Amino acid sequence: MAFELPSLPFAYNALANRGMCQETLELHHDKHHQAYVTALNGFVESKPELQGKSLEEIILMVKGKPDLAPVFNNAGQHWNHILFWQNLAPKGGVIPDSLGKKIVEDLGSIEKFKADFKAAAASQFGSGWAWLVLGSDGKLKVTKTANGSNPLAEGQGKVLLGLDVWEHSYYLDFRNRRPDYIVNYLDQLANYEFAEAQLQSA
């Protein structure tokens, strides 16, 4: 069965007054994410060894194999974006008490978490992602990955939040000001309720 582009969990204009315009979402979701899904389905169709595998199975199966790098990149980006759309919310930016308590326990303070996340996202050279993950030791960590990789592929832990820092995710709204995009995400768009649900289900 072919992989499919998931619908956005909100209207295309739902984030416009919080720093992510309708055109950004239309291009990012309908064009960029769709392109990853289309390419991935093409690879699966042409490679019998990938058929019948879940998205996670494909990512883990092809990681680190140079000849299958295009499969990894498109599968990874499909996985990343499925999470990314859930990481955004029209009334985002509010950290629930239980998640906030865990952040303070593991990362020092809400302010330090945001500073660490901003540093990870801003320092990712070129394209990639910044993440808040629950490590195998039960502690929260801020990490980053390059291009289409992710915490699943790199064994970093369970993802609570992930921010896309490819330029197409912010250029219409913030031009080249990636740090402003990151701060806006943390304070206005981040779906911390989703992050809390991920933490509780771990």
Image (cartoon, rainbow, N blue to C red):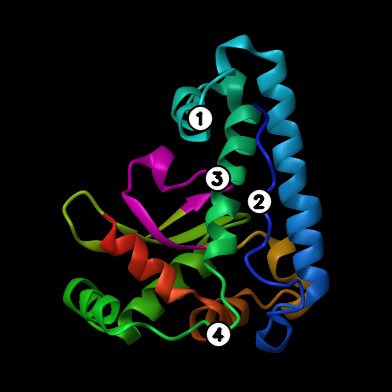
Return the residue at label 2: 6
Quick one: SS at disc 1? loop
Quadrant housing residue 106: bottom left
**Quarter-of-image position of residue 173:** bottom right
Q: Which residue is mark 4?
A: 91
Nearer-the-camera pick, 182 or 6: 6
Q: Which residue is mark 1?
A: 54
The reply, left or right, for residue 114 in relation to residue 146 is left
The label on residue 79 is 3
Q: CA distance from mark 3 to mark 4?
A: 24 Å
Question: Looking at the image, is 153 positioned above or below residue 111?
Answer: above
- Mark with earlier residue (3, 2): 2
Q: Give the Cα distance between marks 1 and 2.
A: 15 Å
Residue at position x 75%, y 67% in the image: 25
Query: For the magenta stretch, what is the residue range?
Result: 145-162
Please tell me which residue is depicted at 74% across the width and 33% down the height of the picture.
39
Question: Residue drawn 33% across and 48% down?
Answer: 156
Is residue 36 covered in magenta? Answer: no
Q: Position of residue 74 (x, y in %)?
A: 64, 37
- Count residues near mark 4 (Cα–Cα under 10 Å), then give few for <14, some for 14-19, many for 20+: few
Q: Split into 4 quadrants, where in the image is the N terminus?
A: top right
Q: Badge 2 local density, few (<14 within 10 Å), some, or many (20+)?
A: some
Q: How many marks?
A: 4
